Every structure is written in C-alpha cells, then in structure tokens.
Amino acid sequence: MPAFLKSVSTLWIFPTFDLIFFVFLEKSLIRAGVSNKVDDSGVTVGKRYARTDECGIPFAITVDFDTLKDDTVTLRDLASMKQIRLPAADLPILILSLSNTISTWDDAVAKYGLFVQPAKDAEEKKE
C-alpha cells in the first residue's frame, strides 16, 4: 500500500512512514518552487488520485514501502494515467521541467521507463 501521494500543488502523506523523508522531500519541492500540503486523512491512494484528477492537477507522486528501501518515487501523469519510477532527488527538477514545458511526459518515460505495478498474484508466487 502506498504511503503518500503528492500532487504538484498538494503533498499527501500517511503518518505511519518515516517523517524525516517527507520533510526532506517537502523542502526539496519548496526550494524548487512547488507548494505542498500534508494530508494525513488515511483515505486510499485511489481516492487521493481521484481528488487530484478532479482538480485537474497534472502530476501526482506516490511514496511507498519501496521508497524507504531505494529512495525512488512514482510519478503519475493525469493525461495518460501512466506512471514512471524515479529517484526522489530527480523529482523537483523533473516536475519543474514538465510544468514549464521544457520537457514532455514522453521525454520522462524515455528516460525512466513506464512503471507497472506488479500483479498481486505474481508477487505471491515470488514469496
């Protein structure tokens, strides 16, 4: 289950994760000029995506358990509903680049590749 979802204008977080990482991410985004807000409501990630979609927010960031292992996050594009996985350190520059049309979503996909969530059955077979 993902721990946090961040959109370009709002930062979403479940309080069960290490807050040091979120403070780092939040400050990195603020320094890059991306405003954000913490949401500890505990609703599902799907409902959070629906909220950002309704508001027309073009990108959403998801932090999950893998983030705590490898410092990567998932970035979701509203227009295509597709996701990429990238180092959290690359996030502020990429969001600014996409928001200011310096690069396109296709450029980001070419650099990081599409992220497809593994199927639950495939995960269970690996264990």
Image (tube, grey):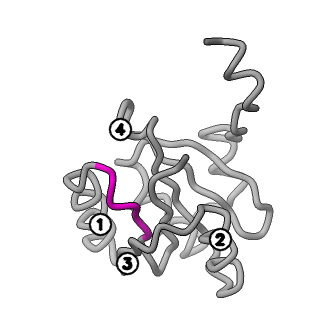
Q: Are circles 3 and 1 on residues that touch, CB within 8 Å?
A: yes
Going from the N terminus, do you reach mark 4 or mark 2 first?
Answer: 2
Which residue is label 1 attached to? 26
Q: Are marks 2 and 3 in contact (CB under 8 Å)?
A: no
> Which amino acid is tagged 2?
Lys
| Rendered position, 51 above or below 23 | below
Q: Residue at x 36, y 79 (%)?
A: 37
Helix, strand or loop under label 1: helix
Judged left or right of residue 81, residue 72 is left
Point out residue 44 in the picture as x, y percentages from the top left corner. 59, 63
Mark 1 is surrounded, within 10 Å at the Cα level, by few (under 14), some (14 to 19) or many (20 or more) other residues, namely many
State which mark lies toward you, 1 or 4: 4
Using a 10 Å C-alpha cutoff, classify the residue at mark 2 as few (fewer than 14 neighbours), some (14 to 19) or many (20 or more): few
Please name the amino acid that badge 1 sits on: Glu
**For residue 29, which quarter of the picture?**
bottom left
- Residue placed under numbered mark 3 in the picture: 36
**Helix, strand or loop for disc 4:** helix
Q: Amino acid type of disc 3?
A: Asn
In contact (CB < 8 Å): disc 4 and disc 2: no
Q: Nearer the viewer, mark 4 or mark 3?
A: 4
Circle on res. 105: none
Disc 4 packing (10 Å; few <14; some 14–19; many ≥20): few
Q: Which residues are magenta?
A: 12-17
Q: Tell which of 97 and 47 is nearer to you.
A: 47
Question: Which one is in front in this view, the residue at disc 4 or the one at disc 2?
Answer: 2
How far is the residue under mark 1 from the one under mark 4?
15 Å
